[in-house]
Each structure stands twice: as C-alpha cells, then as structure tokens.
Amino acid sequence: MNVTPLSSQWRTEKAAVEGQNHCGRWSLSGRHRLCPQLWVVLALSQLKVMSCLVMASRLASPRSRALCCLWLVLAYVSARPANHSAVRERVTNREENEILPPDHLNGVKMEMDGHLNKEFHQEVFLGKARDEFEEDSEPRRSRRKLMVIFSKVDVNADRKISAKEMQRWIMEKTAEHFQEAVRENKLHFRAVDPDGDGRVSWDEYQLKFLVSKGHNEREIAERIKNNEDLKVDEETQEVLENLKDRWYQADNPPADLLLTEEEFLSFLHPEHSRGMLQFMVKEIVRDLDQDGDKRLSLPEFISLPVGTVENQQAQDIDDNWVKDRKREFEELIDANHDGIVTPEELEEYMDPMNEYNALNEAKQMIAIADENQNQHLEPEEILKYSEFFTGSKLVDYARSVHEEF
C-alpha cells in the first residue's frame, strides 16, 4: 500500500466520503456523527483509502464496518516501516553532513586532497548567484543575469572590467562564501553541542559521528567511557584518526581538547584559520612530496593520480591534468619562479583572503577572454566565454550583447 501526502486527489476522495450515508450527512465539523472506528481511519489522511471508506460506510452491519476499518488501520501500520526507514536514512545522512568537514571548500583554490578546484573561477565570480545559473536553463535569462553582474563589477561604468575591478569583486564574493560558512557553522555546532555549554569535547564529537554512521549510541558511549576498543571497521578507524588530528589542530592554545564555536568553524573550514590553513598545506605537501624534502618540484606537483591510462578519453583527461597543474604551478604558486614550491608559497596561494593572489586571479580571468588584448574584459568577451565564468555556454553572445545592455 502506497503512502502519499495530501493532494488534490486526497481532497477529491475526502469529498466523496463526505457524501450521504444511511444515517445522514457526514462532516468534519460534526465528528459525533461518524462511527468512531471510521473517524480513526479518516484521521490517517495520508492513506489513499477513502474510496474503501465509502464502501465501508455502505455496509449494513456496524460490526462489518468496524472490521473493515480495522483492516485498513492494520494495512496502514504494515506500510509504515519502509517509510520510517527512508526517513531514518535521510536524518542519518543529514546528521553526518552536519558534523563532517566538507570535501569541497568554496572560494579556495585547492581541494583537501590537493586537486585543483575546477569550479573556483565560477565561485569567485558568481558567488551565491551560482545556483541561479545552474537552475535556470533559459539562455536569454542567463545572459541578462550575466550582464547584470558585469555592470556591478564595472564600477566606473565604462563598459570594461579592469583587473582592479575584478580583484575587488573576487574579494567581495569570497567574503560571501566566508559568511555563508559562518552561518552554517552555527547550526552544525548546535548539532554537536546539545547541552548548549558552548564547548564540545573530542569524545562527544566522535560519539556523534559514530552514531551518524549507524552505531549504537549506548554501546559506543560505554566503550568511550571505559576507554575500550570501539570495534569499528578499518576504514572508519582511519577516518577517526584523521579527524582527531584535525581536531587537535583546531584547538587553539592553551589546548584543552574542547572546541568552541569559533574553533569548530576552523575544524570544518580550515580556510578560516591561519593555523588550520597551514595544517591543510602540510597535509597536501606530505601527499605530493616524493623525495621527502618537504617542498614540491614541478614533476611532483603534476604527477598523475594513482591509476593507469586505459583509453584515449582517459589519456585526454590526464593530459589536461598535467597542463592545468603546470600552468598553475608556474604562473601562480611558484612566486619567485625558482622551480620549487615551498609550504609558505603554497599557503599564500591557498589563502582565499590574500589580496595579491586575488589580483593575480583577476588578471588570469581577464586574460582567458581578452581577445582584443586590451587587458580589460568587455561584454562581448564575457558572453563568448560564459562557460568559463558561469559553467554554462550561452549561445548567440555577439547578437545579444547590445540587446542585454
């Protein structure tokens, strides 16, 4: 039996039930006129059983009506477990997402695993408006939105975007991502701090994490209290160890292993803390450094991910990987152009609030679309290269530019 929410179909069926029976007219305002058994079933409005109730109302015997209604109630109960299972799964996923550090950091040049953030330029150009471009498939509306953004970036209204104007815009959009992370963190911290004392211990956090993974809360709490083996699988144990290292790094001196709301923000979003950003850089260098000198050469930085090239498509992906990382290494990360990236250089590159980096990014973004080589971005150019700025290719760019303005 399917369980469905209220709908027009439900209202139609309910109207049928509110027809005449042999005792007189039924109405929701006159509950005393309904047989008690029928009222119980009617209250379970999400069930598509109203047509059956009409049949039940026509049975001559009150006993028959009651038995019919009892059958419907039992059918409702038997249908509930699967629905509850789905609800539990959604709740579990939500809770896990609330307390785990995100894999992707908006407005940060590199991912946690050292991969380049392929969506970075769209994130720092569109900010919160990025969702609108993803949801709107109408090119005309998207072009108009893009031109509205162009006008906002073009502060002096000369119909050209300079590197300085783009730099200011990048910093503004990055600040938006920061503010969004702070807002989300307030909710996430509340999820791991149910007593509201403003501090969360590692034991409290790992208990919440393991419960979100399906472990029994009472059993885990008892093992943690007695300092016993948690009896989790190898993969979960590895995740816990990584999270614990990160937890300790987020705990500002003097260390007490209790995270405040601000420290929990650094735990989830390392870009909000200089110390956590350094920790993130250290992890990336450790993963990519092949000769153990705690620095990165170009060959180390462009090394392909683990795996073999199986076909031409994979070969093309690998070629793009090397080309993109080589350009990023030489043009942006290696500040002194000595062929070596130090942790300090990587940290400056990854700092989303670094104004010097924002200016370099602005120049690079303009250069991508600057067909007339005037070091400025013009309406025709931004529409032609809309896929780079928005993730969507907007057709008929040249014909549309005058119309949009």
Image: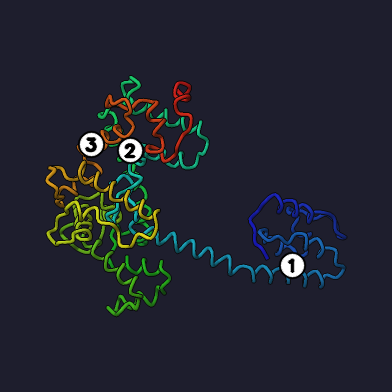
User: Left or right: 89 with respect to 70?
Assistant: left
Mark 1 burial class by Cα count in 10 Å: few <14, some 14-19, many 20+: some
Q: Amino acid at mark 1?
A: Gln
To which residue does mark 1 refer?
37
Q: Position of residue 148 (x, y in %)?
A: 42, 28
Q: Pointer 3 and pointer 2: residues touching (CB < 8 Å)?
A: no
Q: Position of residue 75 (x, y in %)?
A: 69, 70
**Residue 377 position by quadrant:** top left
Q: Is 169 or 249 nearer to us in this picture?
A: 169
Residue at 36 percent of width and 27 percent of height: 152
Q: Position of residue 361 (x, y in %)?
A: 26, 37
On-image quarter of the N terminus: bottom right
Q: Amino acid at mark 3?
A: Asn
Q: Position of residue 94 (x, y in %)?
A: 44, 59
Identity of the residue furthest to the top in this view: 158
Identity of the residue furthest to the front in this view: 312
Distance, label 2 to label 1, CA atoms, is 60 Å
Q: Is 47 or 177 nearer to us in this picture?
A: 177
Q: Pointer 2 and pointer 1: residues touching (CB < 8 Å)?
A: no
Q: Which numbered marker is on residue 360?
A: 3
Distance, label 3 to label 1, CA atoms, is 74 Å
User: Left or right: 273 with respect to 310?
Assistant: left
Q: Is residue 142 above or below residue 123?
A: above
Q: Which numbered marker is on residue 173?
A: 2
Colouring style: rainbow
Mark 2 burial class by Cα count in 10 Å: few <14, some 14-19, many 20+: some
